[in-house]
Amino acid sequence: MAQELGDFIEAAGLLEYDPAAITRIYAGHPQRLIRRLWQTLVPIGLLLLGVAFDWIFQLLKDEERARGRARECAELLVDLGPAFIKAGQALSTRPDIVPPLLLEELAQLQDQLPGFDSGLAMACIEEDLGAPVDDIFEQLDRDPISAASLGQVHKGTLKGGARVAVKVQRPGLREQITLDLYIVRNIAAWLNSN
């Protein structure tokens, strides 16, 4: 399904944000929309229920408990993907609306993100370059030297001896971001009309 949508997005030539094109893409795939809503709303709802429970029973007065909930929130944003990571990064710059412990955890989303699976990264490189890694690189580090919300960077040396940094986009990035933007746009439109 993800590959089918990825092929459709690529065939549509969607290289920049185009709300009408995104609507056409996902209006025909309601099961994808429902699956993503389930993947996001259930974990967010469970986290909020846990925080509400802790707040009602005044468990958040314990700094370790509060820090644990803040860490759980930041980890959830990472698990939910790039659009949510970007939202967390934006919130990490808002001490006027975000409690200090949560602010500390969200600030880590700026520069301390985990990379994705190295085997998957190598497969992405091979697919994009159209050849096995060993045919192009004398050496390519499997572990990334840095990771961000949209991808990660691997250090390597080409067969000719040139040292390079190879940026690898997270797999399924375009599909996930377009779907998340479609959902957010529709929620905002619904809220605006009510």
Image: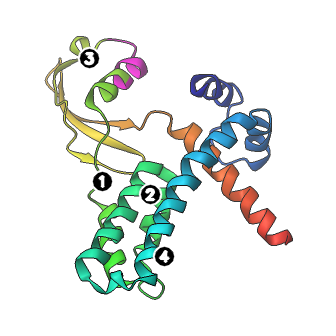
Count neighbours of disc 3 (C-alpha within 10 A) and say few if under 14, some if 14 to 19, many if 20 or more: some
Marks 1 and 4, how far apart at CA: 27 Å
- Horizontal and vertical percent for residue 168? 36, 35
Say which residue appears at 56% left-offset and 42% top-offset.
Answer: 176
**Residue 33 falls in image quadrant:** top right
- Write down the residue under mark 1: 113
- Write down the residue under mark 3: 133
The secondary structure type at the circle numbered 2 is helix
Say which residue appears at 40% left-offset and 83% top-offset.
Answer: 57
- Write down the residue under mark 4: 52
Residue 172 vertical position relative to residue 81 in the rendered view, above or below = above
Q: Residue furthest right?
A: 193
The region drawn magenta spans 124-131
Say which residue appears at 75% left-offset and 37% top-offset.
Answer: 30
Count neighbours of disc 4 (C-alpha within 10 A) and say few if under 14, some if 14 to 19, many if 20 or more: some
Count neighbours of disc 1 (C-alpha within 10 A) and say few if under 14, some if 14 to 19, many if 20 or more: some
Residue 103 vertical position relative to residue 109 in the rendered view, above or below = below
Marks 4 and 3, how far apart at CA: 49 Å
Most frequent secondary structure within the magenta stretch: helix
- Write down the residue under mark 2: 85
Determine whether, in the image, residue 143 is placed left or right of residue 121: left
- Horizontal and vertical percent for residue 93? 41, 77
Query: In terms of depth relative to the viewer, which is nearer, 8 or 43?
Result: 43
Marks 3 and 2, how far apart at CA: 30 Å
Q: Are marks 1 and 2 in contact (CB under 8 Å)?
A: yes
Determine whether, in the image, residue 167 is placed left or right of residue 179: left
